[in-house]
Image (cartoon, rainbow, N blue to C red):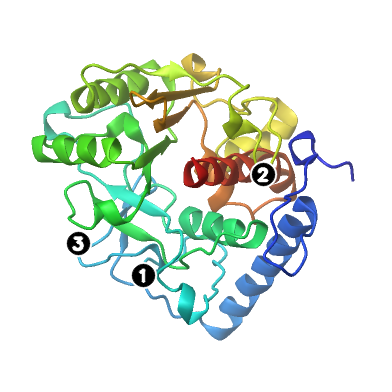
């Protein structure tokens, strides 16, 4: 099979055991995860996250005393587990996800999703890929945090799902601003159309009244790190992506056909915020094992290269 264009550059960073090709690594992981799924079904897999429960629309209720993605039961085919050497247990990258409440004053919104969308599989699968393809040591559990959590400064990378429904209380606005100006980074994904964009932009204007979003150009070094990315691909949600083999449709809304990667920088030009608009990148991480077509055309070709590149860039700049 021809290697997808964005995998033309195999990862050059190795964990010392020798770098395998990106396509081979991803394909081996997918085969592994299907074996795990079968084994789990036969053995009657006991979930760690029994207290988390569905509340509809792809969202979960996750109690406040659940602090990691690993504590939430997989919603798909299982997630990999790994360990780090004792000397690296604290010196690792952690995929941290932001918890937030929806604005009660907005009533019923056309925006879909919330902070738990694609949790926990997206967080853990991408963390595994990062461990697999680079020399970065990665926390196998992830972290769930509010903007006001005093531990937030310990996690330089923060992921936020579905900002079309984002709402921050006043103290969270202040805390997030301080976090970002002090070196933190926020990645937002999985929102579509102009209504959801306007909500995201409005909330971030509360955080940074004097800063505007700008479109990240493809010349930006973020796209030329571990993988060479030549276009802003639209990662469709899994069912839409599977159907796209026959329909060609990868967008969720008519006013959301064009993918935008928009950022906010600090006074020195450091990227503090990045939004992935009109695309569902995290579904490519979460749902990689459900369809060969989806895996090869979305997870492998779009979602993982972009996710790995973003984290690699943020952690080295």
For label 3, the SS is: loop
List the residue tagged with mark 2: 226
Question: How much space separates mark 3 and mark 2, taking CA atoms?
Answer: 36 Å
Quadrant of the image occupied by residue 106: top left
The tag on residue 300 is: none
Q: Residue 296 in the image: x percent, y percent?
A: 74, 45
Q: Residue 176 in the image: x percent, y percent?
A: 22, 39
Residue drawn at the location 66% of the way across and 35% of the way down: 243
Give the mark nearer the N terminus: 1 vs 3: 3
Q: Residue 199 in the image: x percent, y percent?
A: 28, 23
Q: Nearer the viewer, residue 160 or 177?
A: 177
Q: Is residue 289 left or right of residue 84?
A: right
List the residue tagged with mark 1: 71
The tag on residue 64 is: 3
Q: Nearer the viewer, residue 38 or 150?
A: 150
Density class for disc 2 (Cα within 10 Å; few <14, some 14-19, many ≥20) is: many
Q: Is residue 64 above or below residue 197?
A: below
Question: How much space separates mark 1 and mark 3, taking CA atoms?
Answer: 12 Å
Give the mark nearer the N terminus: 3 vs 2: 3
For label 2, the SS is: loop
- Residue depth check, mark 3 versus mark 2: number of the one nearer the observer: 2
């Amino acid at each position: 099979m021809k290697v997808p264009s964005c995998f033309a550059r195999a990862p050059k960073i190795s964990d010392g055991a020798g770098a395998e090709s990106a396509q081979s690594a991803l394909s081996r992981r997918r085969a592994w995860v299907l074996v795990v799924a079968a084994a789990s079904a036969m053995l009657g897999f006991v979930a760690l996250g029994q207290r988390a429960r569905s509340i509809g629309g792809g969202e979960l209720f996750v109690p406040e005393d659940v602090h990691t993605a690993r504590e939430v039961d997989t919603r798909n085919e299982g997630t990999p587990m790994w360990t780090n050497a004792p000397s690296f247990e604290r010196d690792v990258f952690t995929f941290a996800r932001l918890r937030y409440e929806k604005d009660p004053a907005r009533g019923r919104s056309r925006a879909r999703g919330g902070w738990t969308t694609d949790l926990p599989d997206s967080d853990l699968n991408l963390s595994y890929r990062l461990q697999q393809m680079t020399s970065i040591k990665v926390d196998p559990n992830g972290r769930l945090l509010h903007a006001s959590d005093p531990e937030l400064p310990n996690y330089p990378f923060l992921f936020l799902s579905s900002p079309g429904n984002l709402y921050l209380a006043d103290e969270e606005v202040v805390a997030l601003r301080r976090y970002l100006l002090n070196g933190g980074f926020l990645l937002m994904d999985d929102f579509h159309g102009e209504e959801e964009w306007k909500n995201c932009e409005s909330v971030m204007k509360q955080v940074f009244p004097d800063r505007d979003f700008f479109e990240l150009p493809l010349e930006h070094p973020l796209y030329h790190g571990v993988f060479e990315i030549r276009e802003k691909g639209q990662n469709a949600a899994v069912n839409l992506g599977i159907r796209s083999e026959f329909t060609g449709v990868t967008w969720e809304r008519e006013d959301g056909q064009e993918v935008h990667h928009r950022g906010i920088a600090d006074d020195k030009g450091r990227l503090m915020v990045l939004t992935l608009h009109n695309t569902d990148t995290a579904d490519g991480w979460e749902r990689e094992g459900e369809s060969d077509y989806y895996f090869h055309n979305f997870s492998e070709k779009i979602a993982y290269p972009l996710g790995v590149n973003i984290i690699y860039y943020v952690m080295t700049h």
